[in-house]
Image (cartoon, helix red, strand yellow):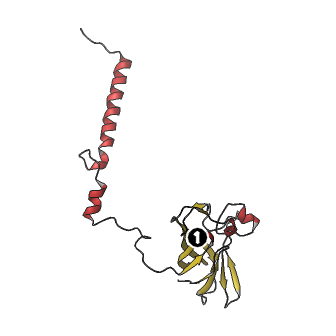
């Protein structure tokens, strides 16, 4: 008995064969040619463990710790002056409490335009007591604050990296106070 394929059936068989070949080729790409996936624990043990990211392993003391409500803590890790005329303040909000906490909406400040863009740290200010000036978080052309936005719940022990950008005080000013609504204020030193 002989099996005869129509032209349409032959094309279908060729397409199926090519597709199967491609699938097998792609499946074997990531494992070093032997079709096995690399063992993550084996590669970690060769290096003596996983390598810390740029944020991990830094044991430096925060520039300031601002205590908030319900066990919230804002640790400031850097405050750097940029040649563009602004200061970027980086930190971490941590829930040191035993239960889930909502980051208070007051941290957005009370400006209608900023509040309209959702929960943020838009209410933060830098205070130059020597120069008697207060610097507010910068905004873009649509009124969005140049800071971490979309703040919400933090579970117990959870951390959230945050940033805030301000106009830069004069180059002669390096010591300022950071004020964030519902948190204590703290003195920080601007670098750069």
At which x and y percent is residue 4?
Answer: 30, 13
**Is residue 138 at least partly visible in the picture?**
yes
The image quadrant of residue 144 is bottom right
Single out the residue that lies furthest toward the front. 98
Q: Position of residue 190 (x, y in %)?
A: 56, 83
Whether residue 85 is situated above or below residue 115 in the rendered picture? below
| Residue 84 visible to an observer of this rendering | no
Q: How many marks?
A: 1
Which residue occupies the extreme top position in the image? 1
Residue 92 or residue 7, whichever sits in front: 92
- Image quarter of residue 16: top left
Task: Identify the element where label 1 is drawn.
Answer: strand
Taking 51 as reference, is 169 left or right? Answer: right
**x, y percent for residue 20:** 32, 33
The correct choice, above or below, for 144 with respect to 5 in the image is below
**In-front residue for pair 179/122:** 179
Read off the residue under disc 1.
72
Horizontal arrangement in the rendering, residue 113 relative to residue 21 (left or right): right
Q: At 62% from the left edge and 85% from the top edge, which residue is drawn?
A: 176
Q: Residue at x 61, y 88 (%)?
A: 173
Quarter of the image containing the N terminus?
top left
Outermost residue, right direction?
Answer: 112
Assess disc 1: are there few (<14), some (14-19) or many (≥20) residues with their C-alpha within 10 Å of its C-alpha: many
In-image side of 179 versus 96 (left or right): right
Which quarter of the picture shows residue 147? bottom right
Locate residue 145, reporting x and y percent. Answer: 66, 67
């Amino acid at each position: 008995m002989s099996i005869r394929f129509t032209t349409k059936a032959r094309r279908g068989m060729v397409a199926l064969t090519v597709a199967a070949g491609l699938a097998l080729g792609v499946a074997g790409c990531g494992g070093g040619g032997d079709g096995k996936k690399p063992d993550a624990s084996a590669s970690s043990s060769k290096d003596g463990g996983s390598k810390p990211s740029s944020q991990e392993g830094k044991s430096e003391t925060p520039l300031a710790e601002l205590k908030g409500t319900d066990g919230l803590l804002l640790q400031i890790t850097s405050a750097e002056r940029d040649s563009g005329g602004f200061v970027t303040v980086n930190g971490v909000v941590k829930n040191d409490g035993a239960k889930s906490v909502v980051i208070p909406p007051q941290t957005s400040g009370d400006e209608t335009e900023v509040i309209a863009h959702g929960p943020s740290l838009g209410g933060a200010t830098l205070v130059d007591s020597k120069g008697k000036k207060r610097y507010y978080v910068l905004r873009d052309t649509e009124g969005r604050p140049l800071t971490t936005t979309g703040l919400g719940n933090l579970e117990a022990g959870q951390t959230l990296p945050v940033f805030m950008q301000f106009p830069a005080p004069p180059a002669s000013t390096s010591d300022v106070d950071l004020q964030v609504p519902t948190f204590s204020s703290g003195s920080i030193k601007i670098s750069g």
